[in-house]
Each structure stands twice: as C-alpha cells, then as structure tokens.
Image (cartoon, rainbow, N blue to C red):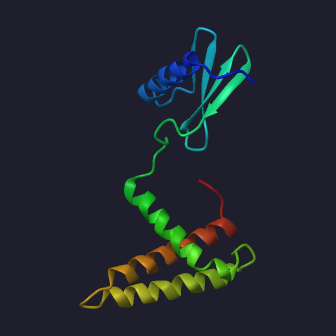
Amino acid sequence: MTQITKRHLDFVQEAKEAFEARPLLETYHGHDLIALRMGVDRDCINVYELGDEIANFVQQMEPNPKPRKVVSEFAHDMDKQLKVNDHKGGWNDEEHHFLSAQLAKNMFALNHELKKLNKDKHEITIRCANIANFAMMIADNEGEHL
C-alpha cells in the first residue's frame, strides 16, 4: 500500500469538487491519479495511482441520491420501532397473511388515534412507523426493488 501524501489529499479535494459540480460524473483523473465515485450512497472516493489503490476515502460528500429530510427522519423512526421489537426475531419466515393482519391492526389503531380530540402525536408516529415496517417486511419477503 502506498503512503498517503498531501498530493493525494489535495487530489481527493479536487475530485470531490468535480463530483459535486457534476453529480453524474463517476470518474475523475488528473496527472497520474484517478478518482472513482464509490459507495451505495455514491459519497465515497477511491483514488488510484498508476493502477494501485491509494485509499478509500469514505463519506467525503453528501449522499447522492440523498433522500428528502422527512424520508430520512421517518426511516430512523422505522428503525427505532424495529429495534423495540428485535426480541421477536426477523420476518423472513412470516406469511404475508400475518404481516398484512399486523399492518391492518396498526391502521385501525392509527385511525382510532387520529379521531381523538387530543391526539397523541408520539402514538401516531409509532403507528405510522409500524405500518411502514410491516409494508417493508411484505415487500422484502414478496416483492423486489424498483
């Protein structure tokens, strides 16, 4: 492995600026260095020098595509609810009939809460996260990514 130098770090900054200016750009090169946009969120930069990898500089840029703030926050709420129920095990062996029934049960509880004069916003968020989680479980077991 090659030692990382200031020249490499300067190149990472140069590549970062190029990638941010052109979101569809996947490869950037200059001198004897090549930078590749990498990672699931396309926010990492791998640098190569004459074919040898210098380093994988992770999370150097904002994730792209970046989900909307409300989507990201709600995904965190969903994950919190999954963690609350971790003791129940996974859902891979659950039949869609059971998961659909749990989704409907949470929909009923949500509708009941929404009809109240003094709504419990925390309970509403819990029910919405549970509904989304059961829908996600059904999609994970029965569907495919879009």
Q: Is residue 41 left or right of residue 127?
A: right
Query: Could you say where residue 48 lies in the image, as x and y percent from the top left?
Result: 67, 21
How many numbered marks appear? 0
For the point 47% across and 31% down, the residue is 23
- Specify the farthest residue to the top: 31
Residue 77 appears in view = yes
3 over 133 or under it: above or below = above
Q: Is residue 94 left or right of residue 114?
A: right
Query: Could you say where residue 69 lies in the image, as x and y percent from the top left?
Result: 38, 55
For the point 48% across and 24% down, the residue is 13
Q: Nearer the viewer, residue 99 or 44?
A: 44
Q: Is residue 68 left or right of residue 138?
A: left
Name the quadrant containing residue 82.
bottom right
Q: Is residue 121 left or right of residue 65?
A: left
For the point 54% across and 22% down, the residue is 9
Residue 134 appears in view = no
105 over 138 or under it: above or below = below
Image quadrant containing the N terminus = top right
Name the quadrant containing residue 58.
top right
134 over 28 or under it: above or below = below
Query: Could you say where residue 61 lies in the image, as x and y percent from the top left?
Result: 48, 36
- Specify the farthest residue to the left: 117
Name the quadrant containing residue 83.
bottom right
Query: Could you say where residue 49 lies in the image, as x and y percent from the top left?
Result: 68, 16
